[in-house]
Structures are given as structure tokens and as C-alpha cells.
Amino acid sequence: MRRQLLLLVLAAGATACAARAPRMTTPNITYSCDNERQVRRDNGRVWATAGASQLALGWRDGEGEHFVSWPTSSTQMEAVEYVMPPDARADAIERVYDTSKGSSRVDWRMVRSTACTANGGYSDALARFSSGKSFDQVAQELSLGDKNEARELVHHALLAVQKRYFREH
């Protein structure tokens, strides 16, 4: 009897911990950075702004994929980097650097860092829910399958905020 109960508990635990099926990534993911629309396209290899400037993928590391506008002349004193996390629903980061001390990245000084909201992502869903919309409304506005998917996005965002809060508390 104990053995059967143990097997039942192990089976239930394995089912609960089973990996989820990977989701298909959208070929054109859009972000909002300082009220400017940004698009990631060509299977994620190009970062484009509404002003038609495009940046090619520079490198990948633990933070994600980096798209950088390198200084093209000695008179240009600024570089912009966009960091795309591996999770397509997570926000990207825009970093602006002062490049007046040299053209090498080690000489750059970060001036500011801004989050670029992934449209239809975790922060977007949380903002809509926080403004008083129901999970059904969030799901409809973000063209999600159902309210459970909206609830999952909001839940993920709340956990991330809570972890950050207690880390800095």
C-alpha cells in the first residue's frame, strides 16, 4: 500500500514538473521604447526603429542578444545598445552610452538604461490588468487564446516584481 502511494505521489510530482511545450516565436516582435515603436524582424537578426534605422545582431551572451549602433566617426559621442532577453515575452533593455573617451566598449560610460516593453508580453499584460481590466479583456486585447493565458502572463510579471522587491528591500 505504501509503495503504491509513493508511486502515485511520484507520478503526480513528475506530471506537475513536466516541461511545457515550447511556444513558437513570432517573426516580428514589437516593443515600445520611449513612445517609439521598435520591431525585431528577419527571424530575430535585425532590430529596426520606426525611423527606419536598422541594427544587425552583434552578439549573444547570458543576458540575451545585443544589437548595437557603433560610433561611425570620431565626432559621434553616443552609442545605443538594445539587449533582447531569450524570452520573447520579456522586456528588452535600451542602453545609451557616452563614447567620448574612446571607441572601445570598455571606454564607454552608460548614460541611461530604459526598459522597452514587449507588446503582448508580461509587463504589457500586467499594466492592462493593473488598470482594472479583467483577464478576459486582457486576453482579448492581446489576442491570446483565453483568460488563462492572460492570467499566466500577469502571474509571471507579478512574481518577477515581487522577487525584485524583496531583493532590494
Image: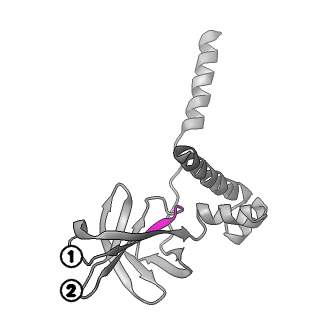
Residue 134 colored magenta? no
Residue at left offset 67%, top offset 65%: 127
**Which x, y percent locates residue 103?**
21, 76
Which amino acid lies under the numbered mark 2 shown in the image of this protein?
Ser
Residue at left offset 61%, top offset 68%: 120
**Which x, y percent locates residue 21?**
53, 51
The mark tally for this picture is 2
Element at label 1:
loop
**Which x, y percent locates residue 108?**
28, 70
Q: Quadrant of residue 46?
A: bottom left
Which mark, by number, is residue 74? 2
Left/right placement of residue 60 relative to residue 37 reads: left
Q: Which residue was labeled with disc 1?
A: 103
Residue 93 colored magenta? yes
Given residues 89 and 37, the one toward you in this image is: 37
Q: Quadrant of residue 71?
A: bottom left
Q: Which residues are magenta?
A: 89-94
Image position of 7 with respect to 162: above or below:
above
Labels 2 & 1 near each other (Cβ < 8 A)? yes
